[in-house]
Amino acid sequence: MSDAVQPPARHRPPTPGARLVVLVSGGGSNLAALLDACADPTYGATVVAVGADRDSAGGLALAADAGVPTFVEKVPDHPTRDAWDAALTARVTVHQPDLVISAGFLKLVGPTFLAAFGDRYLNTHNTLLPAFPGIHGPRDALAYGVRVTGATLFFVDAGVDTGPIVAQTPVPVLDDDDIDALTERIKVAERAQLVDCVGRLARQGWTITDRKVTIP
């Protein structure tokens, strides 16, 4: 029996001054951390636009205060989810991003978006994937009784929290943890990991071979 054919490696070289489009749905704490990092000229990236799926997203105000262009693309404004996906893709494409970052963006993108940005669309998750995917990660980790959970940064694919993993940071589960306390500690680790890895991806480039992400 012959070995399964592996897909070709996908390589992106270093991109000095990488252009970031950040997508948000909420207050934008991860966006704030990226904006702070990008203020350092040695970081290697700049947030060129912030998009949201709702007018109430607090991250839009953060972007406006920083002088960053914003846009809103709401699902109900379109006849189908595919039409929204195409419209979101068009809005992001205008800004010619090197990386697109989901910073608390609560909508699953579709095939049009992934065809355009799938190997450069980053998301964070608040467990150590593949354990406890989905929107209730810390709750599920506590219920299962794990002693360590954490934060995962990954490239988005067509699954739910199933894409190639860029980095992971462990966070211990304490005996007196509740969901809120654990979630807040994971968020701290998540922000630090996001800022570090986005800068490294911009400055050093990356390769995706099957499911393995390599940053030189």
Image (cartoon, rainbow, N blue to C red):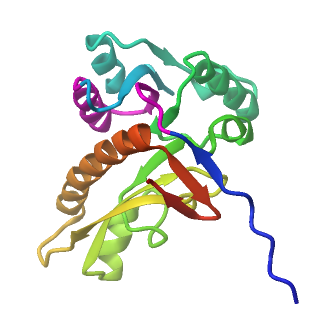
Q: Quadrant of residue 114?
A: top right
- In the current view of this chain or complex, which residue is farthest to the right? 1
Camera-nearest residue between 135 and 13:
13
Picture layout, residue 166 above or below residue 130: above
Relative to 113, is 183 on the left or the right?
left
As for residue 181 lying within the magenta part, the answer is no
Q: Residue shown at 38%/68% (left/top)?
A: 128
Picture layout, residue 76 above or below residue 114: above
Where's residue 175, x and y in %? 13, 79
- In the current view of this chain or complex, which residue is farthest to the bottom? 1
- In the current view of this chain or complex, which residue is farthest to the left? 176
Picture layout, residue 9 above or below residue 84: below
- Quarter of the image with the N terminus is bottom right
Relative to 191, is 10 on the left or the right?
right
Residue 148 seen by the camera: yes
Q: Residue shown at 61%/28% (left/top)?
A: 75
Residue 56 seen by the camera: no
Camera-nearest residue between 116 and 158:
116
Q: Quadrant of residue 36?
A: top left
Q: Quadrant of residue 152?
A: bottom left
Picture layout, residue 32 above or below residue 115: above
Camera-nearest residue between 82 and 152:
152
Where's residue 18, x and y in %? 44, 28
As for residue 16 lying within the magenta part, the answer is yes
Q: Residue shown at 75%/25% (left/top)?
A: 79
The mark total stands at 0
Q: Which residues are magenta?
A: 14-40
Where's residue 25, x and y in %? 42, 33
- Quarter of the image with the C terminus is bottom left
